[in-house]
Image (cartoon, rainbow, N blue to C red):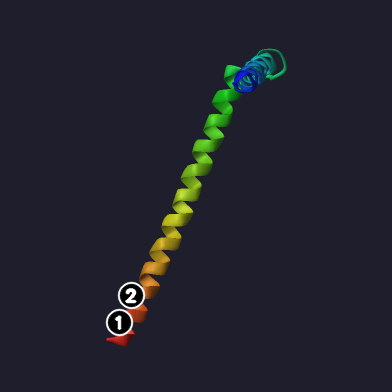
Amino acid sequence: MFKYFKNSYNYFKNSYNYFKNSYNELVHKVTWPSFEQLIGSTKVVLVASVIFALVVLCMDLVFENLMNGVYSLLR
């Protein structure tokens, strides 16, 4: 029975150390971007997403027209 409590104590102690070290790393070691860098990165992601969506739209329209042509030949 004491073995169970000893293992659970180690589990909580290890969990505590993990979260303490994670917090320490986030606060002291991570370099966070400035607000201007964040806005610039957001703009890049938005533009890239719109371009990707337009490419997928064009591919979808081409494939739809191609399949309609194939289906009209089979009728």
Question: What is the x, y in percent for residue 74?
Answer: 32, 86
| Spot occupied by residue 6 in the image (x, y as percentages of width and height) | 65, 18
Amino acid type shown at disc 1: Ser
Q: Amino acid at mark 2?
A: Asn
How many numbered marks have been drawn onto this rendered protein structure? Answer: 2
| Residue at point 33%, 75% (across, down) | 68
Q: Is residue 3 above or below residue 70?
A: above
28 relative to 52 in the view: left or right: right
Q: Is residue 69 left or right of residue 48?
A: left
Query: Which residue, as the protein is rendered here, is positioned at the far bottom?
Result: 74
Q: Which residue is mark 2?
A: 68
Residue 42 against residue 5 in the figure, above or below = below
- Callout 2: few (<14), some (14-19), or many (20+) C-alpha neighbours within 10 Å? few
Quadrant where the N terminus is found in the figure: top right
Q: Residues within 10 Å of mark 1 (few under 14, many from 20)?
A: few
Percent position of residue 73, x then y = 33, 86
Of residues 59 and 12, the one nearer the viewer is 12
Q: Which quadrant would residue 39 be assigned to in this image?
A: top right
Circles 2 and 1 in contact, beta carbons < 8 Å: yes
Q: Secondary structure at mark 2?
A: helix
Q: Residue furthest right?
A: 29
SS class, disc 1: helix
Residue lying at the far front of the rendered structure: 1
| Residue in the image at 49% along x and 43% along y | 49
Image quadrant where one finds the C terminus: bottom left
What is the number of the mark on residue 72? 1
Task: Using the numbered discs, state the Cα–Cα distance from disc 2 to disc 1 in whole angstroms.
Answer: 6 Å
Name the residue located 62 percent from the left edge and 20 percent from the top edge: 15
Where is 16 relative to 45, above or below? above
Q: Quadrant of residue 3?
A: top right
In the image, what residue occupies the spot 54% across and 37% down? Answer: 45
